[in-house]
Amino acid sequence: MVVWPSAQEDRTIDGTTAAHDATGTMPPRAIGRAHVAVRLRDADAAGQSPSVLSDLHQSGSMRVLFPRPAAPPTAMLLNTAGGITGGDRFDISLEVGKGAHLTVTTQAAERAYAAMPGPAGRLSTAISVAEGGAVRWLPQETILFDNSDLNRRLDVELDGDNSSALIVEPLVFGRHAHGEILTDARLRDRIRINRNGRAIFADGIDLAGNVTEQLRHPARGGGAGAMATVVLAHPSAEAQLTPLRLLGDEILGSGAQIRVGTSLLAPDLLVLRCLADDSFNLRRVLLPVLDHLTNGALPICWRL
């Protein structure tokens, strides 16, 4: 069961009270919540997925769609507000039961729009996976616009030694085709994965000010306009190291402005990081990598 904050608690974002207008009321902002839980089917019927939906909650500006029957179940998140700006708050929670599988994606790229002075927009995702369960967290890109202010957090709790997670988090620093640059933007991004209560992966990005200029520095981004982090926490993650490095070598040989690095941090933890000049070239890496890691089951929305 998921318990949401009270209306009074909702007035506080990231420890700071949201700005009020001259009337003393809260300014308009988007709030969205979604909770999806899956479990193993009690008695598996022929031709049906062994994993079934056990709980679903959606409210505010967040919707969960299940476009077609799929094995495992595939949930598609939709932000009906059209993006995230200052003071917006979105909370997502996913629960994968023992032995069950769940894939989650987004209908389109998320957009972090220009924000007024005040609290940042917040997007928080919490995922729990029971023993033998598997989750694929495959959102499409988050595009940062100039003057955007976004706090994003992803927490994954893996229970047992045989649970697994495939995570991708792509970021785009302005729309390259429109000539956009980020002269003043703020991003605070955190990813944390625990197994049996112990941290096995933690990653953070903090950017503020002239992001485009900062990313030109060789030690920060080398001129990158887009980046992605892919994490595979799986008992047999080590077996994917060589195939992913071969895929990376093939892509790099194409002459595109891409840099890819793949590292095995532990036998059950593999991390791939990609920097590209724009989102098009970022996808030239992500599509074959995710196709490989999902055994060709990447959600079709990634190709539209």
Image (cartoon, rainbow, N blue to C red):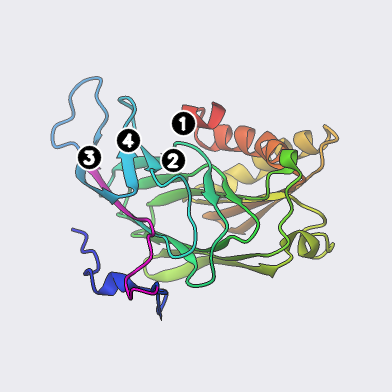
Q: Quadrant of the C terminus?
A: top right
Q: Which mark is residue 65?
A: 4
Of callouts 4 and 1, the N-terminal one:
4
Residue 27 painted magenta: yes
Q: Which mark is residue 105?
A: 2
Residue 114 in percent (x, y) is at 57, 58
Q: Residue lying farthest top?
A: 47
Q: Is residue 99 visible?
A: yes
Residue 179 falls in image quadrant: top right
Q: Which mark is residue 53?
A: 3
Q: Which region is colored magenta?
A: 22-39
Query: How far apart in space, not on screen, are marks 2 and 1 (Cα)?
Result: 7 Å
Disc 2: CA contacts within 10 A as few (<14), some (14-19) or many (>=20)? many
Mark 3 or 4, closer to the camera: 4
Tag 4: amino acid: Leu
Q: Nearer the viewer, residue 285 or 212?
A: 212
Q: Are marks 3 and 4 in contact (CB under 8 Å)?
A: no
Question: Helix, strand, or loop for circle 1?
Answer: loop
Q: Is residue 126 visible?
A: no
Query: How far apart in space, not on screen, are marks 3 and 1 (Cα)?
Result: 18 Å
